[in-house]
Amino acid sequence: MGYLRAVINYRHFIYASIKGEMKGRFARSRIGALWFILHPLAMALIYALVLSEVLGAKIGGVDNKAAYSIYLMAGIAGWGLFSEIVNRGITIFIEQESALKKIMFPRICLPIIVLGHAIINQFILILAIFVIFCFYGHFPTIHWLALPLGIIIISAFGMGLGLILGILNVFSRDIAQFMAVILNLWFWLTPIVYTPDIVPDSIAPALYYNPIAPLVRIYQDIILYNTWPDTNSLLFPITLSAIFLIIGLIIFKKASAEIVDEL
């Protein structure tokens, strides 16, 4: 409750920080915030071109020539939200070293700023995807109303994990380097570029115990298959998200006083 009160009391500081960060990131860029959209869409386009056009990858049960591209972009949107929160969470305390030493404010505001920035980027990307899919003739259905569920769970999972790793990274900078490799491997162990049905039995358990797989599946079910998310498959990632958040806040409370000294 103390953290919640701190976030509420410093809401204007959080808002101004998010706004300033978004402006500053592309201050000298001619197309500005469009890069938020172009990066993941370019990645999706490359994969779609290579795998669907060159290798002939298709999505079973979907009568749409652009099905694979839609599947891919939906998965990348979900993964992009998770990876942005985790990657920024790992480095946020180090990035804001100067502010932490010079300005008095609740340190919990920094992870919240990361979260707010990532969610804004996510909504911009979803809007772009919406427009692109309309050109494909794949129009949104009522199931799109469930997308906030995916955003909330992915954000909670990424926030908890990012908070834990961000604190540990202050005391050991190897964490950021290690997680760069892990996240790259994690991406390929998540059904984004491929569908779960083509996975060999030898590595199928890795998908079963992958907590981000059912979260990415939320986007794919809603956007491509026009179905509601499978709530049973979400029990594991929701539980894990709650555990990570609790552990993250406990570690943060104990290490908060030492973070500035360590920096």
Image (tube, helix red, strand yellow):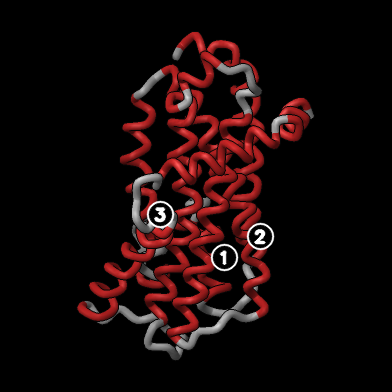
Q: Is residue 216 visible?
A: yes
**Residue 32 image label:** 3
Is the N terminus in the top left, top right, bottom left or bottom right quadrant? top right
Q: Amino acid at mark 2?
A: Leu
* Rendering coords of residue 33 (x, y %): 44, 55
Residue at mark 1: 218
Answer with mark 3 or mark 2, whichever residue precedes in sequence. 3
Please tell me whether mark 3 sits on a helix, a strand or a loop.
loop
> Is 148 left or right of 225, judged from the image as shown?
right
Point 54% across, 46% down: residue: 117
Please tell me whether mark 1 sits on a helix, a strand or a loop.
helix
Q: Is 153 rendered above or below residue 175?
A: below
* Rendering coords of residue 37 (x, y %): 42, 61
Answer with mark 2 or mark 1, whichever residue precedes in sequence. 2
Residue at mark 2: 149
* Rendering coords of residue 56 (x, y %): 26, 81
The residue nearer to you, when weighing 121 against 102, is 102
Instruction: Indicate the quadrant where residue 178 lies.
Output: top left
